[in-house]
Amino acid sequence: MTSTFPNISISTERLVLRPLDEDDVPSLTAMMNDEQVAAWTSVPQPFTESGARTWITEYAPTQRTEGHGIDFAVTEFLTQRLVGVIQLTKTNWHVRSTELSYIIAPWARGEGYASESALVTAQWLFTDQKFERIELRTAADNTASQQVAQKIGCISEGVLRNACIARARAEDGTWTDVRTDFIVWSLLPEDLEGVGEQLRDGFTSFGDWN
């Protein structure tokens, strides 16, 4: 049985999820320097184009080839503009489980892109890759991320107390670490049955766009 995700792309009516490439460096850099991304993720701040290039050319390919996960660039179908990133990490091939996270550019928020891209990734994992569990972890105060988890049908399993390090702006403008809780969510194949009609109507078949 395979222990590496295929290097493919997935499409919906509005979005294409594909491998990151070097043309994404400027957009990825701008997205990662957003205040909300800085607050709720562990990406270095300020995030540089060199850091983006390393992610695209070294980190992401290694994660996939070594079986740890896969990173998708989320782009608009019509414009090809980068709207976000979907990451699968901490993949356990024996249990057939993985952890999913999402980042959406500030200009693209409010369009449903996070839930659409997360759901089509889950569908691909459960159908094509035969996975049995997806896990999400959201910081206790990150209500936007929690709303996405709820919208795609995730079930809240509990709280990991004091397990997350978020960031807040200090008075001098620098970032300071703040400890908080993680809310743990899970998504199983049967959980998608209740959200199919709401979010899948616009999705096309899974496609290899390479």
Image (spheres, grey):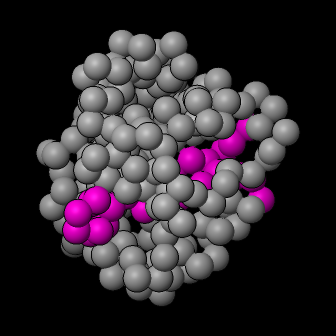
- Which residue is nearer to you in this view: 183 or 29? 29
Which residue does the image show at 66% across and 44% down from the upper left?
90
- Which residue is nearer to you in this view: 9 or 60? 9
Visible in this render: residue 6?
A: yes
Which residue does the image show at 49% across and 32% down from the upper left?
123
- Give the number of callouts: 0
Which residue does the image show at 54% across and 19% down from the upper left?
189
Q: Please tell me whether residue 76 belongs to the stretch shown in magenta.
A: yes
Whether 51 is drawn above or below 17: the answer is below
Which residue does the image show at 15% across and 61% down from the upper left?
107
The percent coordinates of residue 47 (x first, y second) are: 39, 76
Q: Which residues are magenta?
A: 66-92
The percent coordinates of residue 40 (x first, y second) are: 36, 51
Visible in this render: residue 41?
A: no
Q: In the image as oriented, which residue stretches furthest toward the bottom? A: 50
Q: Main secondary structure of the magenta part?
A: strand
- Which residue is nearer to you in this view: 74 or 200? 200
Image quadrant for the N terminus? Answer: top right
Q: Please tell me whether residue 140 belongs to the stretch shown in magenta.
A: no
